[in-house]
Image (cartoon, rainbow, N blue to C red):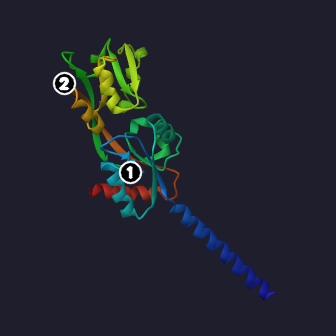
Amino acid sequence: MKWHKRCSYRLLFLGVGLLLLQSKAIAQAPLHWGFVHFPPFYFQTEDGKAAGQLADFVAELMAELERDYTFEQYPNRRMIHLLNEGALDFALVMTSVLKDHSLYRISQRPITSMQLSAFWLGERSEVERVGDLFGSRVILMSGFSYGGMRFMLEPGYGVVREVVEVNEHALGIEALRLNRGDYLLNYKETATLQSAVDDVADIHHSVLKTIDVYFLLRADLPDSEALMQQIDQFLSQQ
């Protein structure tokens, strides 16, 4: 009888030990980061590495947290879809892309900010607000939320007359140069945009809005609350 009890205890301890090991393995599983092609902030190099200012930030942060992570660059629309399906463990984006904020924990302070700007050629009127685009043809980046302003840029809203969408930053400038639109809306800091701008004479821009970028962490991850506290602490020291 005592032998059976000893076996039962051993099996119980073994089972508890396995559960603890499994829980630790789950908690320490690599985090998956999703991003779009948006230099100089983040992009994937030809040899498959994550690069850019925020890629360096992520590497430093994950080293501090002693967490492994994976990453993938997605097309704009695919990235936003995955984010709103709760399929990404973390992302560094503006909060306006989220349909359901409860899916993610959001850092207390922004990581960086971007300037949403209007670009145009020649003597067109300067744009300071969405209303200044009345009756115009506007070139937009596919999948961008524009800080929550995207719905205002639909022709049905009554301001913009026509929308032309492009998938790459440099293509936006090219569409502007080819007169496919009167104005291009994009973020001024984009490196590939800037390189395209440098090749076009008589181009102008104005800043419409400064938009903050936050760290989003999937809320249902094991220990996500404690992990976000560590992330917030790290951000407070930057």
Q: Residue at x 39, y 63 (%)?
A: 65
Q: Which amino acid type corresponds to the residue marked 1 in the rendered image? A: Ala
- Closer to the camera: disc 2 or disc 1? 2
Q: Is residue 160 left or right of residue 117?
A: right
Residue 170, given in percent of the width and then of the height, sits at 32, 31
Instruction: Give residue 162's quadrant in the image.
Output: top left
Residue 34, given in percent of the width and then of the height, sits at 45, 46
Kind of element beneath mark 2: loop
Q: Is residue 78 left or right of residue 64?
A: right
- Tally the numbered discs: 2
Which residue does the numbered mark 1 point to in the structure image?
50
Q: Residue at x 37, y 63 (%)?
A: 63
Q: Residue at x 28, y 41 (%)?
A: 113
Which residue does the numbered mark 2 point to in the structure image?
201
Give the vertical position of 129 relative to 43 (above or below): above
Residue 79, given in percent of the width and then of the height, sits at 46, 39
Question: Which residue sits furthest right?
Answer: 1
